[in-house]
Amino acid sequence: MLIRIATRASPLARWQSNHVAALIRTVRPDAEVVVEPLSTEGDRRTDVPLSEIGGKGVFATEVQAAVFDGRCDVAVHSGKDLPALTPDGLVIAAVPERGDVRDALVGCRLIDLPADGVVATGSARRRVQLAHLRPDLRFQELRGNMATRLSRAADVDAIVVAAVALERLGLAHQLTDVLPATLMIPQVAQGALIVECRSGDVELLALLAQIEHAPSRRQVEAERAFLTELGGDCSLPAGAHATLLAADSDIVDQSSVISVRAVLGAEPDDDGRVKVHHGVEVGADPVLVGSTLAARLRSLVDAGDVSGDQAGPR
């Protein structure tokens, strides 16, 4: 059985696809698994903010297209870069066991950042939360592969990355300050890999189901439901983190209780102050939990609710 995996060409994306390939070979040793790196517009155009070329979804579109048109059989995505709406004809076939969900600083600890310090990040979610924690901070755009990002650390006080990215690349020693998920709510599906294939590929669907990690799937479903309710754009100033409330989080069924903590940023007010709204929702249905929480936070933003946490002028 030949299985061609479409992926971005960056070292991190290759690691992720090779990891999925190894999982597939574990359950199907006779499979011939080939990783096919693709150059996406998001990888090529690192000179402009993602928001100007279609948001983070620009990374996924071309990889998905390779599966649609038959050049490849499977697409492997970093969960945090995948828009919440799955295109017709594709299906999320597997969510392997999730990695570290947390954000991290490289260059300086949060507590040690100087007054009016400069932090580089390309994420609106990270900016609004850091601005809430430290209203004095200033921000610069950060794009490119991990090597490019790490090279920027010398030019600013700190850069923000996903801790799991450096862990997977064998560069965890460069992490200066790993931020608790309760302090800095992660991007939806951060640390998770999402494996897509064509919805009609029955044999492949059955195979990929064997590399599924049920607790990770349940967490990702809740977080992606949160994002779907907000419109599906993974570039929003929003984050969500789901946890399973069970004595043994590896034993999961449809009655397992799940808790989602989330954050949603609003547009700056007339004084330039950034407002963020936090919330928690608990229940047994991950989709209902995520979507209910998103609707509640969005209603606060739409109403211009002044009770949200505020940060200083940006």
Image (cartoon, grey):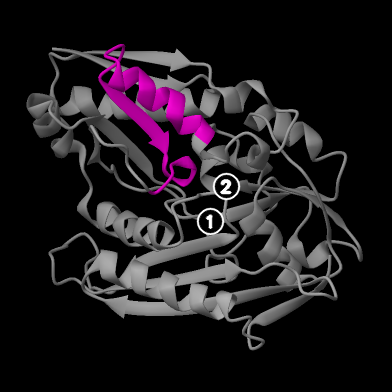
Q: Residue 252 carries which label?
A: none
The residue wearing badge 2 is: 162
Above or below, comparing residue 28 to residue 289 in the picture:
above
**Where's residue 129, x and y in %?**
66, 66
For the residues labelled 1 and 2, say whether their Cβ atoms are less than 8 Å apart: yes
Per the model, the C-alpha gap separating discs 1 and 2 is 6 Å
For mark 2, give the secondary structure: strand
**Can you say which quadrant of the picture contains the C terminus?**
bottom right
Asked whether, in this view, residue 27 is left or right of residue 39, the answer is left
| Residue interval drawn in magenta | 58-84
Q: Nearer the viewer, residue 45 or 6?
A: 45
Q: Which residue lies furthest to the bottom in this view?
A: 307
Asked whether, in this view, residue 209 is left or right of residue 229, the answer is left
Residue 178 in view of the camera: no
Above or below, comparing residue 192 to residue 312 in the picture:
above
Q: Which residue lies furthest to the right in this view?
A: 115
Above or below, comparing residue 161 to residue 305 in the picture:
above
For mark 1, give the secondary structure: loop
**Where's residue 229, x and y in %?**
40, 62
At x 37%, y 40%, the residue is 193
Sort mark 2 into few (<14), some (14-19) or many (20+) by Cα contacts within 10 Å.
many
Above or below, comparing residue 137 to residue 1 in the picture:
below
Residue 227 in view of the camera: yes
**Can you say which quadrant of the picture contains the N terminus?**
top left
The residue wearing badge 1 is: 102
Instruction: Locate residue 5: give its quadrant.
Output: top left
Sort mark 1 into few (<14), some (14-19) or many (20+) by Cα contacts within 10 Å.
many
Q: Is residue 234 magenta?
A: no
Going by the numbered disc 1, the residue's amino acid type is Arg
At x 59%, y 28%, the residue is 42
